[in-house]
Amino acid sequence: QQQVKQSPQSLIVQKGGISIINCAYENTAFDYFPWYQQFPGKGPALLIAIRPDVSEKKEGRFTISFNKSAKQFSLHIMDSQPGDSATYFCAASFNDMRFGAGTRLTVKP
Amino acid sequence: NAGVTQTPKFQVLKTGQSMTLQCAQDMNHEYMSWYRQDPGMGLRLIHYSVGAGITDQGEVPNGYNVSRSTTEDFPLRLLSAAPSQTSVYFCASSSRSSGSGELFFGEGSRLTVL
């Protein structure tokens, strides 16, 4: 079974809106929680990451919120732009990295 | 700076054929891994290696072999290809000895098994 569960599968947001993608995990040994962005025909690339000793990390328009007790974390994209249209993967790692199923984000102009 | 290089980019095989997907990195990373990407399934870990001479299984290792004779190279072998192995394969590396650090991905190898 998938160790990291991601929702929603797809998301459509208007330009300037907020995109929110959620993930949940089971293994409490995970110690690194990244988000990857993937454009068609390319490999995933690291967007932002957090470790479990902090509850929030912000880089520009991208924020990770982390809830250790609920074993959940989420990605917020503020002021979403058409160029943000891509597939986003959450992941969690300890000895190896496990990925969620992905969210296809479409930002409409 | 090449990063992670995968070859070939595209390959068509017949059921039962064998082949090797090549992966090389020039960042002197100890950790390397192979994933397959299928629609609705995300990225699933096939095999990984924490250094030369050391490999381990991931989530979906059946039908695949790996070896790590050098730090730079981590080839993935399909022993007897099956249609279920039709997928996009990604190689990734990390400077962390475990997987708990940024993974750098190659551009992918798209494999079709007929």
Image (cartoon, coloured by chain):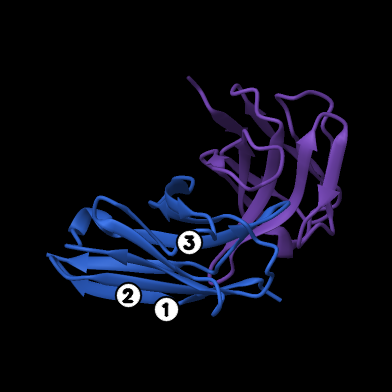
Chain colours: A blue, B purple
Q: Earlier in the sequence, mark 3 or mark 2?
A: 2
Residue nearest the observer in this picture, A47 or B9: A47
According to the image, label 1 marks what residue? A8
Q: Which secondary structure lies at badge 3?
A: strand
Give the chain of mark 3: A
Residue nearest the observer in this picture, B114 or A25: A25
- Three-letter code, disc 2: Leu
From mark 1 to mark 2, how far is it between C-alphas? 7 Å
Is residue B43 rendered to the left or right of residue A76? right
Q: Which secondary structure lies at badge 2?
A: strand
Dot 2: few (<14), some (14–19), or many (≥20) neighbours within 10 Å? some
Q: Which secondary structure lies at badge 1?
A: loop
Give the chain of mark 2: A
From mark 3 to mark 2, how far is it between C-alphas? 13 Å
- Three-letter code, disc 1: Pro
According to the image, label 3 marks what residue? A89
The x and y percentages for residue B108 are: 55, 43
Quadrant that contains the N terminus of chain A: bottom right
According to the image, label 2 marks what residue? A11
Dot 3: few (<14), some (14–19), or many (≥20) neighbours within 10 Å? many
The x and y percentages for residue B62 are: 84, 59
Please tell me if label 3 and label 1 are on a single chain. yes
